[in-house]
Image (tube, helix red, strand yellow):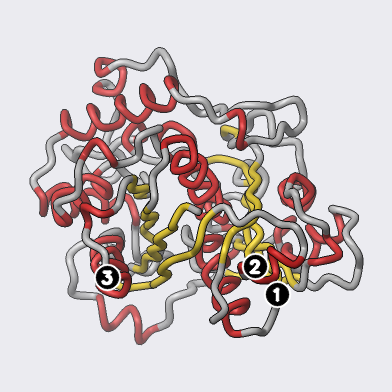
Amino acid sequence: MRDAVIVATARTPVGKRNGGLSGVHPVDLGSFALNALAVDPALVDDVIFGCVSQSGEQSWNVGRNVVLAAGWPVTIPGTTLDRQCGSSQQAIHFAAASVVAGHADLIVAGGVEAMSRVPMGSSAGTAQPYGPLVRARFAAEEGFDAEAQIPFSQGVGAEMIASRWGFTRSQLDEYALASHEKAAAASFADEITPVAGVSADEGIRRDTTLAALGALKTPFKQDGVVTAGSASQISDGAAAVAVTTSSFAAEHGLTPLARIHTAVVAADDPVIMLTAPIPATFKALQRSGLSIDDIGVYEVNEAFAPVPLAWLASTGARADRLNPRGGAIALGHPLGATGARLMTSMLHYQRDNGIRYGLQTMCEGGGMANATILELL
């Protein structure tokens, strides 16, 4: 039977908004991730890249363009997909499915987002991407703004989660502070390829305090609990992984690092939007035959602090295994790249700590979530 294994990973640093990577064109940024992979481009059948804001510099199939910018053979195709924040995680899922099915032998999957240069939501322009039928369907739901160009709000969804699970402002601020502290204590040097003089993730605030976080405003709800401090950072970055089969790896001298054990996608209410990692996790566990306790590390994307906290409360997972080196609150969230960045970081953590199974999941616009279980080899 054909399987799907990861034989190489690479990522750029995650640059803060208007920071050290803001001067790098997103196509060039993606090409750095490709060229950092320890894989012969001549073996690559396809490149699948995630990108959310596919406009301006990220338009016209950025996945194909990063291949050309990397100097790889022009015979290597590339494509671009959008499953919102989970785009590059979905790219990895598609790559795994393709090699298992025999449609390809080796695919590079990843993503890029240069949010300093192509602002979030810019792909919509002045259009209303949700038509009359969607607006009519959800018009009566709390949190849905039928008059807005974009009637679904992630920030409002985060406030709704905090209310439903009963999280306080202090709980969210404490979680955010812990994210920065864990990231500051960790080392990511062995997984990062320096770009434009930037060699480390720029978003980590080593001097932040609960007092500083407590002084921030709550922009999504008057007297709310979610702030910029308990939300992921607007960022720039790219990441990529090489996916093949065990047999192809053996034939070409490649070392499998991890097996893509289970890959699923799920969806939930698009108004609250951010709860789908919970059913996605249960779906992945059911299909894998594993229990939550079998998983040694969980990477649950920190789009907003209520997301991993609600996931933790709902799954019964161990808190000490959740985002052990911090998450997007500290490291940043370059939308289309984050899925592959998380997988790169999780795999390195599994390897360094001898952890057999790791689970990654992340909330996505539209109320969706991918979940992936990696098995260390």
**CA gap, disc 1 to disc 3?**
27 Å
SS type, badge 3: loop
The residue to which callout 1 is attached is 105
Q: Count neighbours of disc 1 (C-alpha within 10 A) and say few if under 14, some if 14 to 19, many if 20 or more.
A: many
Q: Position of residue 138 (x, y in %)?
A: 25, 76
86 relative position to 283: left or right: right
State the image quarter where residue 373 is shown. bottom left
SS type, badge 2: strand
Among numbered discs 1 and 3, the one appearing first in the sequence: 1
182 relative position to 107: left or right: left
State the image quarter where residue 43 is shown. bottom right
The residue to which callout 2 is attached is 244
**CA gap, disc 2 to disc 1?**
6 Å
Q: Position of residue 67 (x, y in %)?
A: 81, 61
Write the residue at 46% across / 25% down.
Answer: 186
Q: Position of residue 32 (x, y in %)?
A: 76, 45
Q: Count neighbours of disc 3 (C-alpha within 10 A) and say few if under 14, some if 14 to 19, many if 20 or more.
A: few
Can the viewer see residue 112 in this picture? yes
Q: Position of residue 75 (x, y in %)?
A: 89, 73
SS type, badge 1: loop
Mark number displayed over residue 289: 3
Name the residue nearer the viewer: 159 or 298.
298
Three-letter residue code for mark 3: Gly
Write the residue at 47% across / 61% down.
Answer: 86
Three-letter residue code for mark 2: Thr
Three-letter residue code for mark 1: Asp
